[in-house]
Amino acid sequence: MPKSTTPNNPVPERDFFADVMDVVRQVPRGRVTSYGAIAKYLGAARSSRMVGWCMNRAHGVKPKVPAHRVVNRNGLLTGKHHFATPAQMEDLLKKEGVTVKKDQVQDFQKKFWDPAQGLRL
DNA sequence: GCATTGACGAAGG
DNA sequence: CCCTTCGCCAATG
């Protein structure tokens, strides 16, 4: 059996990183999700930080990961500084039909997409 | 090996 | 309502 890196870890067969990437890729165009929602969906509701940490490594990952569709629970584009340019995130969102005002997603609740709701269009 | 940080979030004061 | 603390896990110094 694969040894877990941490005794508290019930042998994560899927890498948290890959898992996060997978979920983010499923975010529909014109929608946004939050780190906490992803973390919760993965069963690590209290590890929202890990999600953000993974996103940091998502840079250059294939296929392209729409990290710009991931914001914090506030609907704020907290990670915009990690993109090629700070304006790229909001710019991409706007092109997808998401209105962004000063790093804040408008109608966030309306644009919000939860992986757990996956079936919701 | 310990201390600090990190694209977060919820709870407490 | 604003600020502080805790939690969670991994990376980095």
Image: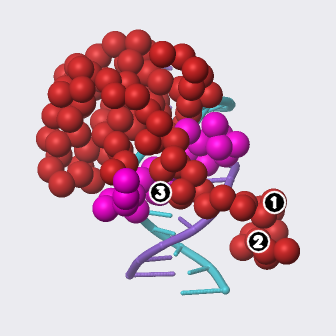
Chain colours: A red, B cyan, C purple
* Nearest to N terminus: mark 3 or mark 1: 1
* Nearest to N terminus: mark 2 or mark 3: 2
* Residue in view at x 33 percent, y 51 percent: A64
Q: Indicate whether A72 appears above or below A9.
A: above
Spatial separation of the CA atoms under disc 2 and disc 1: 7 Å
* Residue in view at x 63 percent, y 37 percent: A41
* Nearest to N terminus: mark 2 or mark 1: 2
* Residue in view at x 55 percent, y 45 percent: A48
Amino acid under label 2? Ser
Q: Is residue A62 magenta?
A: yes
CB-based contact (under 8 Å), mark 2 and mark 1: yes
Q: Which residues are magenta?
A: A38-63
Reading the image, the residue beneath label 1 is A10
Spatial separation of the CA atoms under disc 2 and disc 3: 19 Å
In the rendered view, does A3 fall on the left or right side of B6? right
Mark linked to residue A21: none
Subunit that carries the residue with mark 1: A
* Residue in view at x 37 percent, y 53 percent: A63
Q: Is residue A50 magenta?
A: yes
CB-based contact (under 8 Å), mark 2 and mark 3: no
Q: In this view of the protein, which residue sits in the foreground, C7 or A113? A: A113
Please state, as top left, top right, bottom left or bottom right, where the N terminus of chain A lies in the image: bottom right
Name the residue furthest front.
A63
Q: In this view of the protein, which residue sits in the foreground, A55 or B1? A: A55
Amino acid under label 3? Cys
Subunit that carries the residue with mark 2: A
User: Disc 1 on helix, strand or loop?
Assistant: loop
Residue A52 visible in the displayed image? yes
